[in-house]
Every structure is written in C-alpha cells, then in structure tokens.
Image: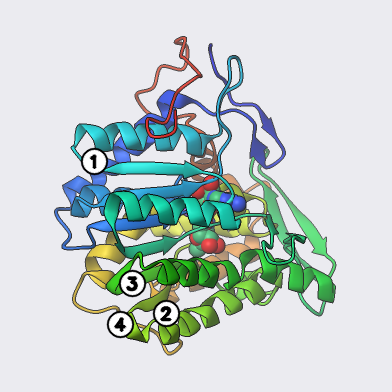
Amino acid sequence: MIIEPRTRGFICLTAHPKGCEQNVINQIEYVKSKGEIDGAKKVLVIGASTGFGLASRITSAFGSNASTIGVFLEKAPSAGRPASPGWYNSAAFEQQAEKAGLYAKSINGDAFSNEIKKQTIDMIKEDLGQVDLVIYSLASPVRTNPNTGKRHKSVLKPIGDVFTNKTVDFHTGNVSEVTIQPATEDDISNTVEVMGGEDWDMWITAMKEAGVLAQDFQTYAYSYIGPKLTEPVYRKGTIGAAKDDLEATAFKITEKSADLNGKAIVSVNKALVTQASSAIPVIPLYISLLYKIMKADGIHEGCIEQIQRLYADRIYGADLQLDDKGRVRIDDWEMREDVQAEVDKLWAIATTENLNEIGDLKGYSDDFFNLFGFKVDGVDYAADVDEVVAIPSIG
Ligand code: NAD
Ligand code: NA
C-alpha cells in the first residue's frame, strides 16, 4: 500500500516501514562512525523500540558488538493496517543485527506484567546466561500494577497552583496561552505508579532472584529536569514527582545489589521530540526555541547522539561526572547558562507571527513526522510498500 501520515492531534495513526528502517540504518551508521565503545556485551533494553531505548539498543549492538534482548509494547501490522513505528524500527534493527552477525531477540508485551518479566528472564537464561547492562527506558501513560491488579493512568499537571503559560500547536504554528488546573492527590500517586521507580525495582529484583544479572552489572534509567520555565508542568508537576521517585529508586537498587557490586544510575537526558513529549503543553514551544539555539551553536543532538555520548564519554568513558544527586547529566549542553539565557529571551517575545523565524518550528515538525518514518530523506513515499513486516525473532 501507499502509506501517508494520518495525524489526530498530537498523534500520528500511521507509520512507514521504509522510513522507520532508514531511521534505524542512519542511527547505526552514526554509532559506527564514532568508533568502538568498550562496553557491555550482553544487554537487556526495556522500552527498546523507539526514542532513547532504541538508541541505547543500537549503541550497545553497533558500538560494542553486544547481544541484545529488547522488550517493548508495539502494534503488529495487518493487511491494510500499518504497524506502530516501534514495530518497524525493531524489525529493521533485528535485520541489521543479523546481517552484522549479532544476536538480537525481542519480546512484545506489557513490561509491567509478571509474565513478560518471566518470559524475558527465561530468554536470558536460555540464550545469554546473564546480562551485564539493563537499560530501563519505558514511557507509558498507563500501568497495571501486577501486585494489585489496579490500572493507573498518569497525568501531566502542575502540583499546588494553576499554571498558565504560552504553548504552540506545532502543526499550525499557533502560539496561545494554556491554563492547566493543579493535580489532585490521586493524580500524583497514579503518575508515580506509572512513571516512578517501582517497576524498575521489580525488574531488577526478579532478575537478581533468577540469577540472570552478572557480577558488576549496571542498570540505567532515564530522567529529565529542564529549565525553570517548564518546572510547574514538568519537574515540579506530577511527572516530576514520578521522576523524583525513579531517581530515589536508583539508590535502593544499588543498595540491594551490593552482593553483585551492581549499580543503578539515572541519566538525565536532553529534551527531544518524542510521542510523549509532544503531548505535554508548553514543552513543544520550549523545544522549538531550544532547537533553534542549539543548532545555531552546533550542539544540537537527537536520541542517538545523546546515547552514543552517554556511553562513550560517561558510562564507558573516563568519568560519569555525577551531579550532587548522583545522576549523570547528559543534558549538560541543553542546560548551559548561555543556551538557557537565550531561550528565556526568545520565550518572552515568541508569538504566532515570529515563531517561524525565532524558533525551529520546522525542525520540530520534521522530527515529529520522522518518529513515524515520514519525511525521511531518501525514502520514496510514492512507492507501494508492504505494510506487513515481520520482526524476525517474533514473526
Ligand atoms: P518513547 O515513547 O520513545 O519510548 C517508550 C518505549 O517504552 C517504547 O519502546 C515503548 O514500546 C515502550 N513501552 C511503553 N509502554 C510499555 C509497556 N507497557 N510494556 C513494554 N514496553 C512499553 O519514549 P522516550 O522519550 O524514549 O522515553 C524514554 C525515557 O526517557 C522515559 O523515562 C522518559 O521520561 C525519558 N526522557 C525523555 C525525554 C524526552 O524529551 N523525550 C527527555 C529525557 C528523558
Ligand atoms: Na525508549
């Protein structure tokens, strides 16, 4: 079929297999161009199909020749109905891994469940014995807690006060004012249930009990901080409460893993266009200004540049350069004083009329479509493509 983008609000309902494949190939080429990283050889990535998790899987495989198992929740294609982008990304990843002689298997299912944890542990036991690196990169709006059977929904709201600020509809470029009502106590606890650290802890605990974690293993989860500007809706909002919980969980896991000399660390990453971040009010306007400034300064990065640098310079480099809260700060360039001062200046004057000029609205929009395999250079979108693509290890 000929597949075109079909957007509804902040989501795109279709994805292009060739565009997703090209994105994966481009990321692989980038990692290879940066040279070998003396990293882990057996790696589990939870949330491996898009965004930072996919970039982590690619960096491990093509930077360190690692065997990888990837867990994700993606929609398979059927005749006339394209898959979700993470499905196509994973199909392309496995094909490329196979070509390179690298072990790669995937599990498509709910990572929050006990069943998927067990299935993953069994696969590690059978195929790899143990893993030495676990990347935890889930982003989800919902979680069913396997202990209680209760389904929780996360929300993106400020805590305490009503928040009003500018935002942009990146499809139209329309800058407007948005007002968000503060969260209830339930909103906060539900968001922590979904995006906090409990599930990360459950994974590591289950893996430890099963003996599939190697001596000196490391596990990383990803977080975000961002500027004062977005604090009410991000770091001091409901999602920030969940990130506080995630960051505290790193210390708990490290403590529990002393017998293996295991370490759990949070890496704070840069703001990037993903399906999740597009849905957060205020953030798209911030990102479009940030992109403009970072591109002009030659310090713009996407997921793959961020993760390649995280591995090469920090995790397997000379020094993690932890902050006073024990976190890796690969958001260092985003948070540079000169960059943030420039964002503040532009934020104050941003309007519908000038955003195209002072911000990188086009970069935002292109990145958004790229997530779904559209507007990717070198792909013939007029050509008929087979929407039914198998992930080799899944079928
Ligand atoms: P993403 O949406 O691109 O990736 C999410 C991954 O989780 C996908 O592989 C998806 O299949 C998987 N997933 C979701 N629900 C699942 C479930 N129930 N079971 C199994 N897999 C499931 O998100 P991302 O932006 O790469 O975010 C990953 C992490 O990085 C998050 O913790 C996020 O907060 C953090 N982060 C994001 C940004 C940003 O700007 N996007 C910045 C810093 C940190
Ligand atoms: Na991810």
**Residue occupying image coordinates x 25% and y 34%:** 98
Q: Tag 3's secondary structure?
A: strand
Name the disc covering residue 29, or none. Answer: 1
Residue type at the position of mark 4: Asn
Given contact means CB atoms under 8 Å apart, are the residues at marks 1 and 2 in contact?
Answer: no
SS under mark 2? loop
- Type of residue at label 1? Glu
Q: CA distance from mark 4 to mark 2?
A: 18 Å
Q: Is residue 232 left or right of residue 23?
A: right
Circle 1 residues within 10 Å: few <14, some 14–19, many ≥20:
few
Mark 3 closeness class: few <14, some 14–19, many ≥20 residues within 10 Å: many
Say whether disc 3 or disc 2 marks the residue closer to the N-terminus: 3
Q: State the residue at coordinates (60%, 15%).
A: 80
Q: Position of residue 239 (x, y in %)?
A: 66, 68
Marks 3 and 1, how far apart at CA = 26 Å
**At which x and y percent is residue 254?**
41, 82
Q: What kind of residue is marked 3?
A: Gln
Asked whether the beta carbons under mark 1 and mark 4 sit within 8 Å of each other, the answer is no
Q: Horizontal placement of 322 versus 41: left or right?
A: right
Location of mark 4 (residue): 261
Measured in 3D between alpha carbons, the distance from the residue under mark 3 to the one under mark 4, in whole angstroms, is 9 Å
Q: Which residue is mark 2?
A: 327
**Circle 4 Cα neighbour tier, 10 Å, few/some/many (<14 / 14–19 / ≥20):** some
Q: Which quadrant is the C terminus positioned in?
A: top left
State yes or no: discs 3 and 4 in contact (Cβ < 8 Å): no
Q: Nearer the viewer, residue 345 or 99?
A: 99
